[in-house]
Image (spheres, grey):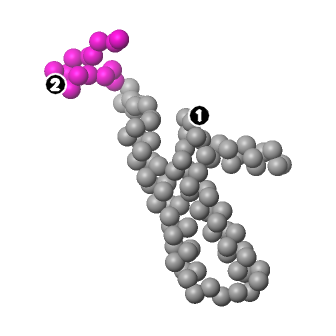
Amino acid sequence: MWRCMCDFLTAMTYENGIPSLTRFFSIISFIAFLAASFYLMWNNQQWGHYDTFAFITGGGGATTQIFNKYFNSKYSSKTIDLTGKSPTDGTTGEPQARK
């Protein structure tokens, strides 16, 4: 069970076999949110700035994933042809020569 959980968390931090810093930040912020929330609940404490903390760690993880998607689609992801057509050069419609 422990090994399966570690494999799952490792798979969540990698993209295309390469470690992803933005995914790592998302996971760390989510763990911080869970740990602080559990601590406050366990000790029955009130924290005046908990709403700000929850917004930054919870919402920050979602925002980080948006930037992760942007960076991966712009810089590191391979282009996938979903139409099934051969690539064209865009001006004449002629198929590009394969290199």
Q: Given the image, on which type of amino acid does mark 1 rest? A: Gly
Frontmost of labels 2 and 1 is 1
In the rendered image, residue 38, in percent from the top left (x then y), is placed at 72, 74
Q: Which residue is mark 2?
A: 91
Query: Image quadrant of residue 32?
Result: bottom right
Q: Which residue is mark 1?
A: 17
Q: Which residues are magenta?
A: 85-99
Q: Given the image, on which type of amino acid does mark 2 rest? A: Thr
Question: In what quadrant of the picture does the C terminus appear?
Answer: top left
Q: CA distance from mark 2 to mark 1?
A: 35 Å
Residue lying at 65% horizontally and 42% vertically, measured from the top left: 11
Q: Is residue 14 left or right of residue 44?
A: left
Give whichever of discs 2 and 1 has the lower sequence position. Answer: 1
Q: Is residue 65 left or right of residue 99?
A: right
Q: Is residue 95 magenta?
A: yes
Q: Where 74 sits versus 94, above or below? A: below
Q: Residues within 10 Å of mark 1 (few under 14, many from 20)?
A: few
Q: Secondary structure at mark 1?
A: loop
Q: Where 34 sits versus 91, above or below? A: below
Residue lying at 81% horizontally and 44% vertically, measured from the top left: 3
Query: Image quadrant of residue 79?
Result: top left
Q: Where 65 sits versus 55, above or below? A: above
Residue lying at 44% horizontally and 36% vertically, measured from the top left: 76
Q: Is residue 41 magenta?
A: no
Q: Where 39 sits versus 68, above or below? A: below
Tell which of 94 and 99 is nearer to you: 99
In the rendered image, residue 30, in percent from the top left (x then y), is placed at 61, 63
Tell which of 81 and 6 is nearer to you: 6
Q: Secondary structure at mark 2?
A: loop
